[in-house]
Structure formats: C-alpha cells, structure tokens
Image (cartoon, rainbow, N blue to C red):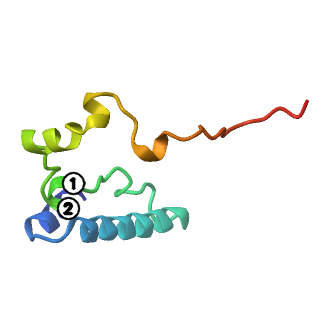
Amino acid sequence: MSQFARLMRDRALAVEAINERLRKIRYIFEAAKGNHQLPVNPAAETLGFKESTTDKYGRGRITFNPQDTDLLFGLRIFLKHERSAGQTGRRRRIGFRPLC
C-alpha cells in the first residue's frame, strides 16, 4: 500500500487527493474484513502524506526592518511613557462587582 501511495506521489497528485484515495481504500478493506472476506485489513497501517505548510501557504512571515520598528515604537507614548489624549480621562471600572 505504501508503494501505491509513493507511486501516486511520484505522479504529482495533490497530497489531499492521495490521502482521500488512501482513506477510501482503507474503508473498502475494512468493510471486506468486517464481512469476513479478508482476515486482516492490509491498508490499516498505511500512512498518508502531510503537505508542507510553506508549500501550502507560500512564503513565511516577513520580519520588521529597523525603520518599521523605529516608526512604531518611536512614538512619545513609548519614549516618554505618556498616555494619549484619549486615555487621560477618568478611568472606567470594568469587571466584577460584588453584590454585597
């Protein structure tokens, strides 16, 4: 069975298609075993393939360059530890209030 899976992989079938076919073959053999037509399921131990996430989703994350981090963290709220104008008002109490 693993030879059959490798053959499909060599034919450049998509990983999802290979795994789908292997699931169907395992189910057919499992049904034959359940009907006492086979003593064991020959496909029970056959593993599928896992698709590389890099291949699936493309390139990984792009890191910030020093100019980006200076732009983001060079604001006065970070440098001088000042609050923005929207946060200088009375603090709103959020959370649990006891009933007693």
Task: Assess disc 1: are there few (<14), some (14-19) or many (≥20) residues with their C-alpha within 10 Å of its C-alpha.
Answer: few
Whether label 1 touches label 2, CB < 8 Å: yes
Quadrant hosting residue 56 = bottom left
Examine the rendered structure and indicate whether residue 61 appears above or below residue 33: above
Mark on residue 97?
Answer: none
Residue that badge 2 annotates: 56
**Which residue is under mark 1?**
53
Identify the image quadrant of the C terminus: top right
Q: Is residue 81 left or right of residue 57?
A: right
Mark 1–mark 2 distance (CA, rounded to whole Å): 5 Å
Task: Name the residue type under label 2.
Answer: Lys
Residue at image position (44%, 62%) is 38
**Mark 1: amino acid:** Thr
User: Which element is circle 1 on?
Assistant: helix
Asked whether the viewer can see residue 56, the reply is: yes
Q: Quadrant of the N terminus?
A: bottom left
Q: Position of residue 15 (x, y in %)?
A: 22, 64
17 relative position to 87: left or right: left
Quarter of the view holding residue 40: bottom left
Residue at x 21%, y 54% (from the top left corner)? 53
Q: Residues within 10 Å of mark 2 (few under 14, many from 20)?
A: few
Q: Is residue 52 visible?
A: no
